[in-house]
Amino acid sequence: MIDAFKNALKITELRKRIIFTALLLIIYRVGAHITIPGIDNEAVSKFFDDLMGRVGLIGFVDLFSGGALRNMTIFALGIQPYISASIILQLLTVVVPYLEQLSKEPDGKKKITQYTRYGTVILAAVQGIGISFMLRNPASLGLGFTGSIVKSAIPLWQFHFLAVVTLAAGTSFIMWLGEQITERGIGNGISLIITAGIVAGIPSAISSLYTSLTTEGDQQLGLIELVFFIALIVIAVMGTIYITLAVRKIPVQHSRRVVGRRIYGGQANHIPLRVNAAGMIPIIFAVTLISFPQTLVTFIPSELLQNLVLKVYSPLIYWPVYALLIIFFTYFYTAVQINPVDWADNLRKSGGYIPGIRPGRATAQYIERTLDRITLPGAVFLAAIAVLPALLQKKLGVQAGISGASVLIVVGVMLDTMNQIESHLVSRHYDGFLKGTKLRGRRGR
C-alpha cells in the first residue's frame, strides 16, 4: 500500500490532483475556525454545548459541519443545506413529471445540479435567519441560558444582516470547494469535505478517551473497557467495509445481432445491486424525524409536551423506534433511487436479458424481488451501526463522540477515493493498493 502511494506521487497529473485536493481541504479547515462577526466565542460555545445535550439533531448537524456549528464560524451550516437540497431534488424527481423527464435528457443533470445550487442558497439563508434570531435572544428557547451571545455594541439589524449573509456565503463557498475538488481534484468533493470535518474531531475523541482513562472516581474508564471499545471500532469498520462493497451480481446475456458481415453482442456481463444502496441517507432521515419532538419542546416550552416527550424518549421506546425508522427509510430511499421497471426497459432496448427470465415485466419483478431481499441485511446493518455504538458508549461510560454515521462516511469516502487513485495507477501500468487484485469500488465494478 505504501508503494502505491509512492507511485501515485510519481504520476504528474495524479500528484497535481492530490495536492489540489489537500490545499482546498486545508482552506476549508481554516475557515472552520473563523467566527462570524459580533459574537462572544466563549458564550456561544457554552450555549451550543447545552443545546446539543437537549436536541440530538443539532449534534448531527454539527457532525457534518466538522464542529464549526458549536463555534459558530463562517462555515457553521457546513454542507448540510446542500445535502438537504440534493435529497429534496431526488425525491421531487420521482414525484414531479417535469423533473423526471429532465433527469433523462442529455443535459438534464446539469439543470438539476443548478436547481440544487439554488435550493442550497435558499435553505442556507433560511437557516441563517433562524440562527441569527436564536443567537440574538437565546433565552427564548427556555433552556435557562441567561447570558448574552451577541456583543451589545453591534446594532440589531446589522448583526442579522451580517449573520445571514456570512452563513449563506460560507455554505455557498463550501459547495464551490466541493465541486472544484470533484472536477479538478481526486474523489468526491462534498464527501471529502464532510470526512475532513469528522477526521478533524479524532484528536478531541482521543483526548476524551485519555481523560476518561486517567480520571479517578466513578467516571474512570478501565483498561478492559478501553480494549473492548477499540475492538468495537475495529469490528464496526470491518463490517462497514464488507457491507459497503457487498453486491449481488445479476447475470445478463446480450443477444447476437448480425449487421452486414459483422456480429455484434453475444457477450455476458452482470448488473451489480449494492446491499447498501441507500448509503447513510436513511440515518439522516431517521435522526431528523425522531429528533423533531425533542426540537419542538425545546423551541415551544410546555410542561404537557415535555412529559409526553420524556415518555417517548425512554430507552425502551426510543432505540427500537430509531432502528425501525432506519430500516423503513432504507427500503424507501432504495425504492426512490432504483426503478426496476426502467432497468428492465433499458435492458430490453439494449438487447439484453437475464437468463431464465422473460424480458419486460417479469425482468422488472425479478429485479425488484432480488433488491428487496438484499436490502434487508443492509438495512439491519445500518440500524445496528447507528444504535449499538451509542448504547455501548453509554454502557461503558465512554465520551469519545464516535458515531456509526461517522464510521459509515469515513470508510465509504476512503474506499471511493482509493478506488479512483488505483484507477489512475492501473491505467499507467502501476500496481494498485492490493497486488494481484483490483480494489472494488462501491458500485461493484
Image (tube, helix red, strand yellow):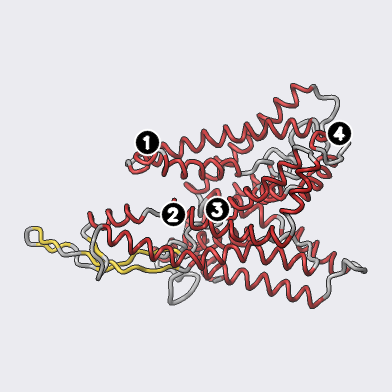
| Residue mark closest to the camera, 2 vs 4 | 2
Q: Give me the C-alpha separation between circle 1 and circle 4.
A: 49 Å
Picture quadrant where residue 48 is located: top right
In the drawing, does residue 298 fall left or right of residue 255?
A: right
Could you say which is closer to the camera, residue 189 or residue 53?
Answer: 53
Earlier-in-chain disc, 3 versus 4: 4
Residue 38 percent location from the top left of the image = 79, 30
Picture quadrant where residue 303 is located: top right
Q: Amino acid at mark 2?
A: Ala
User: Extreme left residue here?
Assistant: 260
Q: Give me the C-alpha separation between circle 2 and circle 1.
A: 19 Å
| Label 1: element kind | helix
Label 4 sits on residue: 148
| Label 4: element kind | loop
Q: Which mark is residue 281?
A: 3
Earlier-in-chain disc, 1 versus 3: 1
Q: Which mark is residue 335?
A: 2
